[in-house]
Image (cartoon, helix red, strand yellow):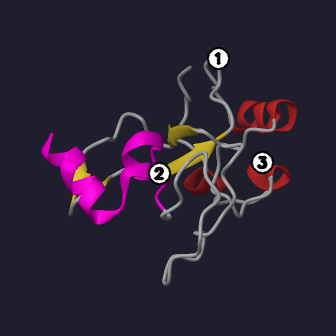
């Protein structure tokens, strides 16, 4: 109840109701840019689901989750074991599970893609 009351008072009810990503975007909404957050201000109207890039590391550190959180249009229904499978999922479903500024073609092309994509395996 306290969290709900605080969210209403702070004007952040959308974050509580819809979830939000690590960059300040509320999932399922068109967002305004947040100063100092380069990937904020995105149109997430088609991305209504919250996706944790490392669902096994949900510890809270300095009032933030240890895992990067994204807004996605859908989550996988089967386990994804390789970056090739993550790439195929993105290309067939239109739901991109790596950071927003990484093109799905590069999921398997750049050496540090494993730092910009979810920890494998990705559970359903």
The one of 22 and 66 positioned closer to us in this rendering:
22
Residue furthest bottom in the image? 35
Is 61 situated left or right of 42 in this image? left
Instruction: Report, in whole angstroms, how far the alpha carbon at label 1 lies from the one at label 3.
Output: 21 Å
State if disc 2 and disc 1 touch (CB < 8 Å): no
Q: CA distance from mark 1 to mark 2?
A: 21 Å
- What residue is shown with label 2? 20
**Where residue 2 sits in the image (x, y, percent)?**
13, 46
Q: Which mark is first along the chain, 2 or 1?
A: 2
Residue 50 image offset from top left, x and y in percent: 51, 40
Specify the segment rendered in magenta: 1-22
**Label 1 vs 3, first from the N-terminus:** 1
Check residue 52 for magenta coloring.
no
Q: Tell me the residue that label 3 is attached to.
A: 108
**At 52% across and 54% down in the image, what residue appears?**
26
Q: Earlier in the sequence, mark 2 or mark 3?
A: 2
Across the whole image, how many numbered discs are drawn on residues?
Answer: 3
């Amino acid at each position: 109840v306290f969290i709900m009351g605080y969210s209403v008072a702070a004007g952040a009810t959308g974050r509580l109701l819809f979830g939000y990503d690590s960059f300040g975007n509320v999932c399922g909404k068109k967002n305004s840019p947040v100063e100092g957050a380069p990937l904020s201000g995105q149109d997430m109207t088609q991305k209504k689901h919250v996706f944790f890039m490392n669902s096994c590391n949900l510890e809270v550190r300095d009032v933030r989750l240890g895992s990067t959180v994204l807004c996605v249009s859908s989550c996988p229904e089967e386990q994804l074991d390789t970056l090739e499978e993550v790439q195929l999922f993105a290309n067939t479903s239109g739901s991109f599970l790596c950071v927003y500024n990484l093109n799905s073609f590069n999921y398997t092309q750049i050496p540090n893609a494993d730092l910009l994509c979810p920890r494998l395996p990705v559970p359903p």
